[in-house]
Amino acid sequence: MPKIFRHIYTILLVLISWVIFAFEDLGKIGTYLGTMFNLNGSIFANSEAIYYFKNYVIIIIVGIICSIPFTKLREKIKNTEKNKKKEIIFGTIGSVACVLIVIVCTASLVNNSFNPFLYFRF
């Protein structure tokens, strides 16, 4: 199977399997999946979806950027001897980015500290 189809299959499997943990009543899973894949006549983007998109667009963009594999770029930089400084700069930028991500995640957890943890409902 081509790599792109394996990737899409994995993403769909993960999305569908997380639905199991979203509800205490397993009877609601079918309705939720139908809405998720637009099978029961729901509209694609309502005002609530637009509201959440506006609030989380920065996190979505950061997630897209962070999911891009930069290994080929790094290999090109490593292969040339004169680019040692660039490798150090990329390493430093990566380390700073990791620290910033931890800070943002911690701030988000502190902000949402009164929400019940997902598995406590089961």
Image (cartoon, grey):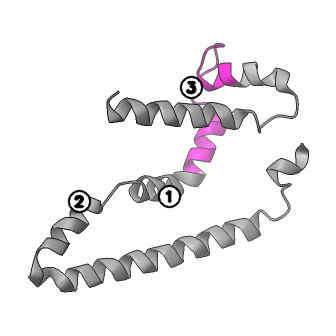
Q: Residues within 10 Å of mark 2 (few under 14, many from 20)?
A: few
Q: Amino acid at mark 1?
A: Ile
Query: Left or right: 11 with respect to 112?
Result: left
Q: Residues within 10 Å of mark 3 (few under 14, many from 20)?
A: few
Q: Which percent across, then down, holds residue 59?
A: 53, 57
Tell me which label, 1 or 3, sits earlier in the chain. Answer: 3
Q: What residue is pinned by disc 1?
A: 58
Q: Residue at x 39, y 57 (%)?
A: 65
Question: Marks 3/2: CA distance?
Answer: 37 Å
Q: Which image quadrant is residue 38 in?
A: top right
Position of residue 76 measured from the top left corner of the image (x, y, whole percent) = 16, 66
Circle 3: element type: loop
Residue 92 in the image: above or below residue 113: below
Task: Of the two numbered discs 1 and 2 on the same chain, state the one appearing first in sequence.
Answer: 1
Instruction: Report how far apart the C-alphas of labels 1 and 2 lie in the structure.
Output: 26 Å
Q: Amino acid at mark 3?
A: Phe
Q: Which residues are magenta?
A: 33-54
Give the camera-side residue of 88 and 78: 78
Say which element carries label 2.
helix
What residue does disc 2 label? 72
Q: Is residue 89 above or below residue 54?
A: below
Q: Secondary structure at mark 1?
A: helix
Image position, residue 34 (x, y; %) = 66, 19
How far across and down, in percent of the image, does residue 27 sit? 84, 21
Q: Quadrant of the C terminus?
A: top right
Mark 3 or mark 2: which comes first in sequence?
3
Q: What residue sits 60% from the left and 76% below the top? A: 103
Numbered label attached to residue 44 = 3
Front residue (pair 6, 113): 6
